Image (cartoon, grey):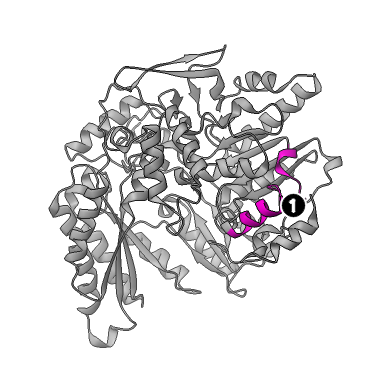
Amino acid sequence: MDLRKLDAALKKVEKPARYIGGELGAVVKDPDQVKVRFAFAFPDLYEIGMSHLGLQILYSILNDQEDIACERVFAPWMDMEEQMRKLGIPLYSLESKTPIKDFDFLGFTLQYELSFTNILNMLDLAGIEIYAKDRKEGPIVVAGGPVAYTPEPLADFIDLFILGEGEEVNLELIRLYQKIKEAGGDKEDFLLEATKIQGIYVPKFYQEVYKEDGTISHRESLADVPAVIKKRKIDQVDTMVKNHEQIVPFIETVHDRVVLEMIRGCTHGCLFCQAGMIYRPIREKSKENLLAQARELIDKTGYREISLSSLSSCDYRDLLPLINQLMEEFQDQKVALSLPSLRLDTFFIDVLKEIEKVKKTGLTFAPEAGSQRLRNVINKNVTEDDLKKVCQAVFKEGWSKIKLYFMIGLPTEEEEDLLGIVRLAEMVKDLFFNRPKEEIKGNFTVTASASCFVPKAFTPFQWFGQNKKEEFLQKALWIKDRVKDPKIRFRYHDPSTSVCEAVLAQGDRRTGKLLYRLYELGAKFDGWSDSFDEAIWQQAMEETGITPEFYAYRERPLDEVLPWDFIDIGVSKAYLKKEYERALKGETTLDCRKACNGCGIENCSMWEDFHASKS
């Protein structure tokens, strides 16, 4: 690549550090000394991608292999893309500035549906044919991550999907590629052979067959390939997932800190939560492993904050001992701790008292729904009393700014549930001010934020029809009109983006033509409010016939063939149906730690622990 052109482009963009590489912890290998080159692609801004733990883990695993080079590439912002197209600069890797089309693999991580248009745009910037069927040369285009569990909207553009956790399977794929290449095989040979690896889905070997009403009749295999794709999971996260390296960016990112994954999976069974289903069963890392990683990463990166990451941090069995030991060990270095996903219970207070010794982090609580009735429907086992007790405790400890997170448009939602959002915010405000005057310190605000509910695959709500855009807006404005106190702020998410997200989240293979038309019309960074263009989406939907009426708003019969039914996540469809029916009756399900609910997942320690306690 012509580095003079790159230098000229960097002088004209807002944040050139997004595009230069060379950070502490980055790995640069001699291309002539490796056998396979893998470009890890995050289809969003550098600041977002560099905050993603999965990138750091896979980057480290692949680069630990002497004969593999893993390099990074992110979606360039508008100003950089303009310069790249103007000067003829192809999409390139940060480490070696190699054009992406010269790599063996281009691997996209799929974290959210509204990044899909960026994927098509990045392929175009790289000079790679957008449709998989048109690619005769260039890298194998791979996609993984949580949104890969609903792959069909991207099926026409991706060569193969990795369904499940990628720490082991990426290496298996690369070794298979080497074997096929050394034997003189071609891309077709590799793709067919790859289907024998658990967790690999190659769309070209399958097709959907539709009924007259537009729903799916069945799927057909076009080669000798598995009819059902079983997800990959790491059984021994403690020994396999060792995050011993972390790249330190030159510029501020969303999460500028050491990140340690304590738990993979969750036992609470919130019915709206896709992650809680697809990451089952729960698996913990040992306290000793986490302490060792913390020491190594703090020493290598110079960060002064550690984030203990999981879907529900309070479920980690050794949480308090871990926090106490981290605080003691790093007290001289003033290293702060943060836990982004704490549960509303008394144990939370004990944890909070420890982590506040160095730094008071922001507090966000997630009741999710305004009434207990609706919290029961979604199986969010949190009560108003839980919120009250925790708020009283944190106010006593000196906190004065609270955020409450809710969703609107949940199944069976009524006006009383919406009013409950206002009432809970008012309750929190009253708890702060109804104390002795000498205890009231700080400028108090409570922010109630409402997102628009998007039904997701592999959850009990996958059959639910999403609220229409107008309904979302009407509900949000109804709540806003009832917030009278200036100490209470109400914010709501743009319903338009949530509807577009739902179309892709519920999409079959036909939605690929919507994505391609969006790309042609210039859609990109659709997850960003300042770049999302609803008019483009409306035009593309009208021209392709892919509408929210069919893909987002429609309630699906329980016996309908869903676009992702060919994927086995371990949790049975029968279990999801049972939970959906229980939800509509307002019946709750116990935490997996308290009782085995028979979801169908294999090798579950919760199942073993529960039955051992009964014997």
Q: Is residue 438 above or below residue 362?
A: below
Query: How many tags in the picture?
Result: 1
Q: Quadrant of the C terminus?
A: top left
Which percent across, then down, holds residue 498? 35, 48
Asked which quadrant contains residue 542, the reply is top left
Which percent across, then down, holds residue 416? 13, 54
At 47% from the left edge and 32% from the top edge, which residue is drawn? 512
Which percent across, then down, holds residue 179? 76, 23
Asked which quadrant contains residue 400, the reply is bottom left
Q: Amino acid at mark 1?
A: Glu
**Would you name the residue on which mark 1 appears?**
95
Disc 1 element = loop
Q: Residues within 10 Å of mark 1 (few under 14, many from 20)?
A: many
The magenta stretch spans residue 138: no
Q: Is residue 478 above or below residue 144?
A: below
- Near-viewer residue (178 or 185): 185
Q: Is residue 415 above or below residue 411?
A: below
At 33% from the left edge and 69% from the top edge, which residue is drawn? 402
Magenta range is 79-103
Q: Is residue 198 left or right of residue 184?
A: left
